[in-house]
């Protein structure tokens, strides 16, 4: 790239800009409001915020997501640091949170752990609508709880959040992907079936056939669709423990009024899931981007990292997909907002005093506009009215000499002279 050539953001890693500078879907006001409402919702359910580094050792994701997963085999941004260590940009959130729980000894606490996060994730895939190389994920995790009501809570929190922000046309898909105790027998049954169709499978699925045949069920290649549709399903091969857990999940979801459908083909895209797997789709979206959130149980994940057996369940949901879903249903979380007030000056000699007053009002939490450049009073007033400001505060002239300002209500077309100390009660 030439030094004179303008630099641009990497394709699929987009800037989030204020209203008026960006698309109405991804404006920064909507992002901030969505994050605020998410934090408010999950904190009311007892989750506490956690933040992990954007960069982790590559081995973390190799151990957890699985060598044959698309994430590890195709999509990670991986590089060596100056010390020759292999590092990767974080492609998903659960592995990093599990690493933090293990590293800081949190699993040794006497109570269950409930965390949430809002964090960027990175995947080197082909950018398209609703699928980006950098996306921001809303996520949460429960640790040290084995009861299916914990799984139901995670699903209900996600579904409830979507409903709370106004989304409808939602479908909760659930499945059980079994456990290490019952999966080996199912694996052999599935492998025998897939081998009879091996010559028709896509290249990726042929590669995975012997190493991880369950990953074939997650294929998005159209060549695999008919074969996957006829494959035996894990739900028919559950042992008594997994069957009881799945039945308990369904009963808990019914108890809290979350409608769901059983999708026996659902396996999600990561190797670490056991027992519960789920997704939430939004039918007002198109094609492959209908999934706006999902997750499941991963009881063995911390153990894979060298820690004690620690049950865990959680979800992830991309902000970009959620905003697209809101747009598809005509919902805006945040509308452009005008400043509450504008401080104007009658002549340039009062400009510094006007600035000081504007800063005082801002410190009191009142959104206040001020013109940094010398402008005539009439132009300042026109600009304030165009911006939708409710109150104009005039500094200068005889009133200022008496220690007063003029407060103009641009909506009611009234004005009063008053001491600056009386402004804050009038404006709040």
Image (tube, rainbow, N blue to C red):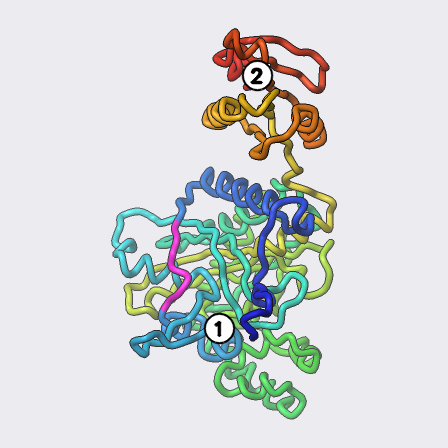
- In the displayed structure, would residue 125 be above or below residue 298? below
The Cα atoms of the two marked residues, 1 and 2, are separated by 61 Å
| The disc label shown at residue 37, or none | none
- In the displayed structure, would residue 398 be above or below residue 90? above
Q: Main secondary structure of the magenta part?
A: loop
Q: Residue at x 41, y 52 (%)?
A: 142
Q: Residue 41, image x and y in percent?
A: 51, 40
Q: Residue 368, image x and y in percent?
A: 56, 28
Residue wearing tag 2: 396
Q: Residue 70, image x and y in percent?
A: 53, 75
Task: Name the image quarter holding the N terminus.
Answer: bottom right
The answer to whether residue 213 is visible is yes
Residue wearing tag 1: 76
Disc 2 secondary structure class: loop
The answer to whether residue 170 is visible is no
Res 339 → quadrant = top right
Residue 102 falls left or right of residue 201: left
Q: Residue 277, image x and y in percent?
A: 53, 62
Res 348 → quadrant = top right
Q: Nearer the viewer, residue 135 or 272?
A: 135
Residue 334 falls left or right of residue 251: right
Q: Nearer the viewer, residue 374 or 253?
A: 374
Please report the bounds of the magenta region as a residue range.
50-56
């Amino acid at each position: 790239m030439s030094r004179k050539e303008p630099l641009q953001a990497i394709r699929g890693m987009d800037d989030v800009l204020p209203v008026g500078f960006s698309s109405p879907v991804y404006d920064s006001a909507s992002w901030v409001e969505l994050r605020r409402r998410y934090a408010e919702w999950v904190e009311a359910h007892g989750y506490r915020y956690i933040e992990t580094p954007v960069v982790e050792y590559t081995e973390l994701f190799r151990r957890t997501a699985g060598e044959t997963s698309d994430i590890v085999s195709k999509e990670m941004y991986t590089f060596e640091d100056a010390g020759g260590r292999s590092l990767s940009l974080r492609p998903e959130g659960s592995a990093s949170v599990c690493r933090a729980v293990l590293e800081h000894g949190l699993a040794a606490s006497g109570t269950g752990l409930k965390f949430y996060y809002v964090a960027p994730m990175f995947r080197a895939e082909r950018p398209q609508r609703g699928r980006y190389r950098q996306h921001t994920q809303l996520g949460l995790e429960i640790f040290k709880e084995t009861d299916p009501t914990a799984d139901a809570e995670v699903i209900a929190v996600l579904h409830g959040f979507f409903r709370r922000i106004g989304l409808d046309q939602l479908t909760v898909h659930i499945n059980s992907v079994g456990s290490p105790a019952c999966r080996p027998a199912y694996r052999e049954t599935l492998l025998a079936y897939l081998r009879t169709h091996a010559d028709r499978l896509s290249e990726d699925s042929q590669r995975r056939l012997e190493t991880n045949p369950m990953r074939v069920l997650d294929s998005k290649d159209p060549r695999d669709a008919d074969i996957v549709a006829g494959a035996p399903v894990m739900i028919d091969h559950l042992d008594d423990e997994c069957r009881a857990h799945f039945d308990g999940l369904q009963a808990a979801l019914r108890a809290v009024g979350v409608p769901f459908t059983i999708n026996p083909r659902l396996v999600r895209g990561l190797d670490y899931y056991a027992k519960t797997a789920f997704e939430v789709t939004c039918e007002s979206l198109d094609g492959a981007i209908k999934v706006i959130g999902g997750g499941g149980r991963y009881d063995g994940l911390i153990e894979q990292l060298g820690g004690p057996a620690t049950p865990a369940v959680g979800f992830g949901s991309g902000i970009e997909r959620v905003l697209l879903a809101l747009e598809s249903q005509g919902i805006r979380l945040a509308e452009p907002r005008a400043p509450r007030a504008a401080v104007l000056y009658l002549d340039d000699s009062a400009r510094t005093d006007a600035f000081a007053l504007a800063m005082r009002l801002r410190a009191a939490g009142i959104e206040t506009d001020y013109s940094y450049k010398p402008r005539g009073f009439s132009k300042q007033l026109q600009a304030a009215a165009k911006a939708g400001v409710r109150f104009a505060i005039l500094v200068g002239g005889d009133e200022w000499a008496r220690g007063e300002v003029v407060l103009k209500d641009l909506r009611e077309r009234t004005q009063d002279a008053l001491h600056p100390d009386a402004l804050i009660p009038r404006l709040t």
